[in-house]
């Protein structure tokens, strides 16, 4: 929805109200949600978002994009980072809680899961491909994923 890669963005609200916003993409999403909900009142639309875009799950009648739910993509990345880089006794409980809660304003609209498709696109990286400690502190690798 923006004319940027997003890799260098800090995702503050002011970043969404500037010349980089792709207005055509926003209008497409708004119209798509309006049409889908008008034709199929029981339909559920889900946005995949890592930026907490303002109004993502607000009704289009209130200026939002009209999605019913959004997927919090930060949790799978956090778990993968923890498993690969941080010993379990050093995991930050405050980071885990803040990541799982996400943007509290839209927490009731958030869907959360442990693994996302991005991790499957990276060869050899599966959430269930984890290292487990056995007796004696020896590291054993178990591949539980596909």
Image: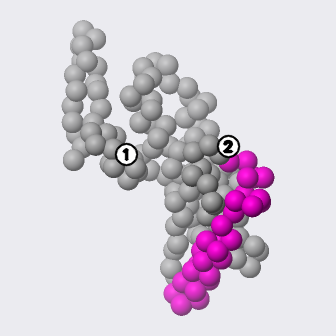
In the rendered structure, find residue 10 and report the number of the disc placed on it: 2
Residues under numbered marks 2 and 1 in contact, where contact means CB atoms less than 8 Å apart: no
- Crowding around mark 1 (Cα neighbors within 10 Å: few <14, some 14 to 19, many 20+) is some
Whether residue 143 is visible here, answered yes or no, is yes
Residue name at image x 21 percent, y 31 percent:
142
Residue name at image x 44 percent, y 36 percent:
79
Residue 40: x percent and y percent?
Answer: 51, 87
Pick the front one: 1 or 112? 1
Q: State which region is magenta.
A: 11-40
Residue name at image x 62 percent, y 38 percent:
98
Circle 2 — which element?
A: loop
Residue 81: x percent and y percent?
Answer: 45, 32
- Residue 28 colored magenta? yes
Circle 1 — which element?
A: helix
The colour scheme of the drawn protein is one colour
Q: Is the magenta region chiefly helix, strand or loop?
A: helix
Residue 78: x percent and y percent?
Answer: 49, 37
In the rendered structure, find residue 45 and report the number of the disc placed on it: none
Residue 100 is left or right of residue 57, and the answer is left
């Amino acid at each position: 929805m923006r004319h940027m890669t997003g890799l260098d963005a800090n995702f503050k609200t002011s970043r969404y109200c500037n010349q980089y916003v792709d207005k055509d993409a926003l209008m497409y999403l708004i119209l798509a949600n309006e049409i889908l909900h008008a034709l199929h009142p029981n339909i559920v639309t889900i946005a995949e978002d890592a930026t907490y875009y303002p109004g993502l799950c607000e009704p289009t009648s209130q200026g939002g994009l009209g999605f019913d739910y959004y997927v919090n993509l930060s949790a799978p990345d956090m778990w993968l980072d923890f498993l690969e880089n941080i010993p379990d006794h050093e995991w930050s409980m405050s980071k885990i809680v803040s990541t799982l809660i996400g943007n509290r304003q839209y927490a009731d609209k958030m869907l959360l899961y442990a693994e996302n498709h991005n991790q499957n696109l990276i060869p050899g990286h599966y959430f269930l491909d984890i290292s487990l400690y056995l007796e004696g502190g020896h590291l054993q690798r178990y591949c539980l994923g596909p």
